[in-house]
């Protein structure tokens, strides 16, 4: 189960501090990590501005964070990592920034696909294909194909994704089936709506992280986040390192998830 962590811990080159860190990872993993972590990666623009760099330099640095966090999440035993990389509203940004963002999956995957394969990571995507440039789609398609048999972490990019549109589409599909006499009103259940969403083959997120101090959901997985634990941090996405993820997961592990019911002593 923790093969990757045990292998890391057995590295004879580790000094005492590094050994201590690996043991901390092992403790976190043993405690039970969230099966699905979803992240709103925010603050790239501010990271760049603080350094008098163009906004796109922040996105580029953010891409490096994606690599680090993917690797650690995979080693900890997280099953799904969904990253909000581009929303249906992000088209409102300047064309140059949009073009840059659309090139990032390609750059990321052309650089790190061999590593993702080596790490047993499976690439997936949620979001609308329409409007996406063909080079973006083909990079994702190639990565999905190359990793489809992998059994480790699912790295799920939310690209041109919008939760309200997703819900509207699911509702339209249900309405069409009712109108055609193929579905009864009584069959419109929470499960039926869930199965009409782009996430239908994924567990609901256990933990949502948003970086950069903004405290809102920005049209991200509104239905799926109903019982998700939320973690907001001031850290800007390019600065969100391994320590930041560990802090979020350790905090999550202290929470008492009740899903509307009672837990432990109170339930008796
Ligand atoms: C929000 O920060 C961030 C985005 C809209 C883009 C997120 C994309 C990445 C982190 C890179 C993704 C990498 C891959 C591999 C797809 P912002 O620009 O709104 O920051 P600001 O609020 O500080 O201006």
Image (tube, rainbow, N blue to C red):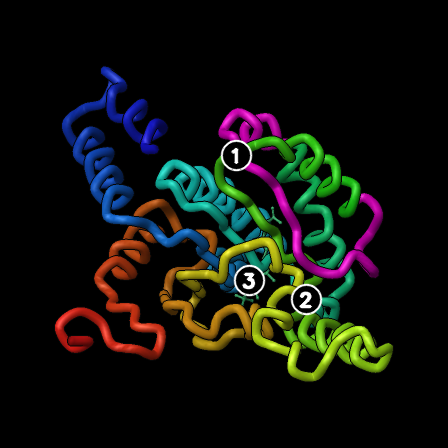
Looking at the rendered structure, which numbered label has been put on residue 165? Answer: none
Q: Nearer the viewer, mark 2 or mark 1?
A: 2
> From mark 2 to mark 1, how far is it between C-alphas?
24 Å
Q: Nearer the viewer, residue 122 or 135?
A: 122
Mark 3 — residue?
A: 45
Q: Is residue 25 above or below residue 170?
A: above
Residue 1 lies in quadrant: top left
Looking at the rendered structure, which numbered label has been put on residue 196?
2
* Nearer-N-terminus badge (1/3): 3
Ligand 1: does it lie within 8 Å of the C-beta at label 3? Answer: yes
- Residue placed most toward the observer, 91 or 40: 40
- Specify few, some or many for label 2: CA neighbours under 10 Å numbering under 14, 14-19, or 20 or more: some
The reply to whether the magenta stretch includes residue 125 is: yes
Q: Residues within 10 Å of mark 3 (few under 14, many from 20)?
A: some
Front label number (2 vs 3)? 2
Q: Residue 14: horizontal and vertical position, in percent?
A: 23, 22
Residue 186 percent coordinates (x, y): 65, 82
- For this view, does 11 lie left or right of residue 117? left
Seen from the viewer's position, the closer of residues 235 and 129 is 129
What crowding class fits label 1: few (fewer than 14 Cα within 10 Å), some (14-19), or many (20 or more)? few
Determine which residue is flagged by label 1: 151
Q: Quadrant of ligand 1?
A: bottom right
Q: Which residues are magenta?
A: 111-135
């Amino acid at each position: 189960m923790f093969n990757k962590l045990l292998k890391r811990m057995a590295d004879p080159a580790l000094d005492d501090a590094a050994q201590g860190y690996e043991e901390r990872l092992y403790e976190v993993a043993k405690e039970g990590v969230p099966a699905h972590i979803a992240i709103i990666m925010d603050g790239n623009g501010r990271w760049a501005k603080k350094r008098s760099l163009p906004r796109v330099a922040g996105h580029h640095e953010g891409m490096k964070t994606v690599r680090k966090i993917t690797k650690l999440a995979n080693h900890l035993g997280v099953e799904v990592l969904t990253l909000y990389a581009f929303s249906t509203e992000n088209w409102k940004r300047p064309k140059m920034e949009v073009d840059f963002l659309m090139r990032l999956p390609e750059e990321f995957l052309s650089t790190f696909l061999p590593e993702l394969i080596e790490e047993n990571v499976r690439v997936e995507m949620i979001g609308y294909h329409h409007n996406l440039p063909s080079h973006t789609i083909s990079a994702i398609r190639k990565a999905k194909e190359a990793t489809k048999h992998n059994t480790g972490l699912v790295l799920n990019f939310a690209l041109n994704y919008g939760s309200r549109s997703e819900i509207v589409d699911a509702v339209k599909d249900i309405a069409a089936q009712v109108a055609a006499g193929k579905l009864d009103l009584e069959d419109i259940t929470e499960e039926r709506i869930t199965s009409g969403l782009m996430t239908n083959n994924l567990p609901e997120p256990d933990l949502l992280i948003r970086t950069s101090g903004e405290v809102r959901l920005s049209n991200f997985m509104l239905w799926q986040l109903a019982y998700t634990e939320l973690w907001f941090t001031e850290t800007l996405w390019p600065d969100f390192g391994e320590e930041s993820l560990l802090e979020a997961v350790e905090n999550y592990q202290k929470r008492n998830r009740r899903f509307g019911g009672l837990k432990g002593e109170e339930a008796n």
